[in-house]
Image: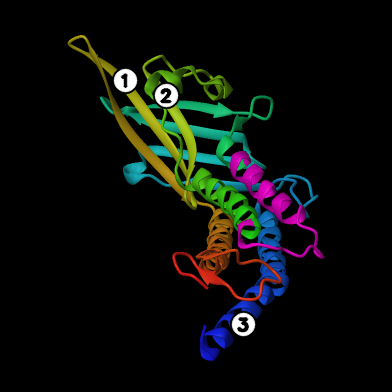
Amino acid sequence: MADCEKEEAHNLQMEFEWVLHEEVHSSLSQLRNILMECAQRFPLTLFGNDQPNKTDRFVFAAPHDSIKCVLVLTGDSITNADVSFKVNRQQNQNMRTSIVNDHPWKLQQIQDAANHLQQAIAHIDNVDKHYSFKTSDEVMHVLGNILGCLQRSRTSLIVPRKKNLDELIRSRNMKSLNPNLPESYAISFYVQSYKLILAVYQLENSHGSVKYEHTQAECSVPWLNEALVLLTISLQLCQRLKDKICVFSQYKDFTVGSRVPSPVGMKG
């Protein structure tokens, strides 16, 4: 190997060891700080957030006042709500129902996102601050676990799980409504990105097949937007570090203390 190649290999080896010993731990520390800040946004008791569940009041808007709703969100549950909506075939008739403290409506998406966030922080905490990584594979394994948690947390808030009408009607949350709605109606509360959505479904039997009409109202939830921004920043930071480690993964037998790294497919 020529002297210039040896020098380049030596410099690359030094950079690799610096990344493993310094940058990985620095990035994990920075990542943890961002995730702790994200946890503070959630209205739940999480890592570093031991305050009682936060309470917010929201007013929904819908075109032509087809749906009206005022609700109180406590933690991950709707603890109080007044809902009214127009019956499409009889526009002058309103259907009304409510949710009271005794039977809250659970928003599982918020709890799921919080659980995945906590798992991501736990993966970081499982790495001893003084541990010396030996190989890129070790780091990739840790980053893979963290990235998976962050992606699941973000997806929980952005992509609500689709339910068919039968699932909606029979869901446990529908039992929170007082009075109960007629069997031809169903409502659903769910999170989509930074918004809380209220969807109303009206079923009708037409020539033996069941069809439904769908209307919805929504409101912006500031803390959801802030949490999603922090999750996105965390994902980008984690991915950048992973990409950098991937550069070293192309070398075989490239570990701390090795003298000359050999690119895969080449002989040193």
Q: Distance between the residues labelled 2 and 1?
A: 8 Å
Tell which circle, 3 or 2, labels the residue nearer the N-terminal end: 3
Which image quadrant for residue 167? top left
For residue 187, side relative to residue 154 (left or right)? left
Q: Cβ–Cβ below 8 Å for labels 3 and 2?
A: no
Q: Give the x, y percent position of residue 126.
A: 76, 52
What's the distance in space between the residues labelled 3 and 2, CA to CA?
A: 67 Å
Q: How crowded is mark 1: few (under 14 residues within 10 Å), some or many (20 or more)?
A: some
Viewer-proximal residue among 248 and 210:
248
Q: Is residue 43 visible?
A: no
**Where is residue 64, by image quadrant?**
top left
Percent coordinates x, y for residue 112 in the rendering: 60, 40
Asked whether 133 falls inside the magenta stretch, the response is yes
Are the residues at dot 2 and dot 1 in contact (C-beta closer than 8 Å)? yes
Q: Nearer the viewer, mark 3 or mark 2?
A: 3
Q: How far apart are marks 1 and 3 (CA)?
A: 71 Å
Residue 176 position by quadrant: top right
- The numbered dot on residue 10 is 3
Residue at left offset 44%, top offset 43%: 159
In the image, what residue type sits under mark 2? Ala
Dot 1 or dot 3, earlier in sequence:
3
Q: Say what secondary structure mark 1 lies in.
A: strand
Residue carrying label 2: 186
In the drawing, does residue 130 fall left or right of residue 263? Answer: right
Q: What's drawn in magenta, residue-wise?
A: 111-137
Mark 1, residue position: 203
Residue drawn at the location 64% of the way across and 49% of the way down: 117
